[in-house]
Amino acid sequence: MRESNISNKILKWYDNNKRKLPWRKKTSTKNREYFTLVSEFMLQQTQVKTVIPYFENFIKNFPNLKSLATSSEQKVLKYWEGLGYYSRARNLKKTAIKLLKEFEGKLPKDIEKLKSLPGIGEYTSRSILAIAHNKPYIPMDGNVERILKRIFLLKTNDEISKDNLYKKKSFFGFSKRSSDYAQAIMEIGALICKPSLPSCTSCPLTDNCKAFKRKDFLIRSKNKLNKTKYFEASIYSYKNKFLLVKNKKFNFLKNLVIFPMIEINQKKFQYSVYKKINVKMSNMNMKIIINKNNKIKKIKDSLLLDKSNINKYILPSFTKKIFNSISQ
């Protein structure tokens, strides 16, 4: 079977234009699998340019599966600090342990076995199979969806539904270079078929693209509801030390260190005289009152952190934002 004209065009573009990313380095099969695993976990809900320095630092400190599996969770979280969505780091460590115990340190080539690993779902399993094992999968991320929406000029809710997009994915056909091909399609979405101002003059698919022919590049998306919630953060400080707690109350930032907080209603937020800050987290807009208190209070699961020593602790960006706010 010959590869399709579409795949030939896409791969030719990729060979001439692909980014030099640290997880794409030519290396041994074992390292390729490990690099793919780490990068795919990091790339969940995070942009490539953000991931690059974190990946390089992480690999420097955990160069292989064994070093990751045998390191403390605290150390793993420290080198994940600032990347957010910390459950990914915990799941990555759990997956490393399970791979060594049950799969001889190798990534399974079976999709159901892959999905049995912590933190690996439909998308990540397909990415791993394509990139690490050269299996004929095209993972459906936002980049791939955007290309399909423009190729077929999909606008209505039915047209942009997941089911319809999966059917339209057959447009790409196949390639014997499945690993490169999956990455090439996503690369076109990231570099060429951008959400706004697509670089059509550099695109290998303009002959096939209805959006290009009609000059209609507007992308329709399913509306994601961003909830707005209101909180009050209590700041207890004494001699440059601040009281923080291990978060067991809220689903976000579970088990990480935050300032003591309660959820409040909009009315209390609006009429409060305290300083207010806004923090965006995933699909939630957080509006937070900063309530300063002078005396240290005893709270279960709390700890005192010295502000001058703050970099020694694993703190989510969320907590650092509040620290920065009270510093100002």
Image (cartoon, rainbow, N blue to C red):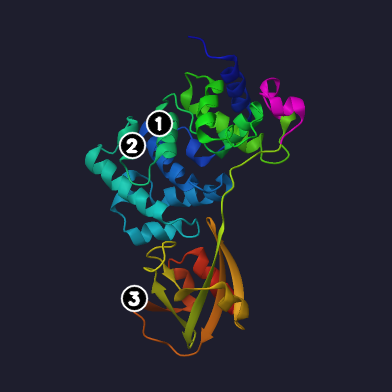
Q: Nearer the viewer, residue 142 or 92?
A: 142
Image position of 103 (left or right of 59): left
Question: For the view shown, which residue lies furthest in the left direction?
Answer: 101
Q: Which residue is mark 2?
A: 114
Q: Residue 48 placed where, x, y %?
A: 56, 45
Point 31% across, 55% down: residue: 71
Quadrant showing the C terminus: bottom right
Instruction: Return the disc, 3 or 2, that comes first in the chain's sequence.
Output: 2
Q: Is residue 328 among what the camera can see? A: no
Q: Residue 24 placed where, x, y %?
A: 50, 35
Q: Is residue 70 above or below residue 245?
A: above
Q: Quadrant of residue 10?
A: top right
The alpha-carbon separation of the residues under discs 3 and 2 comes to 36 Å
Q: Tell me the tag on residue 301.
A: 3
Dot 2 amino acid type: Leu
Q: Tell me the tag on residue 129.
A: 1
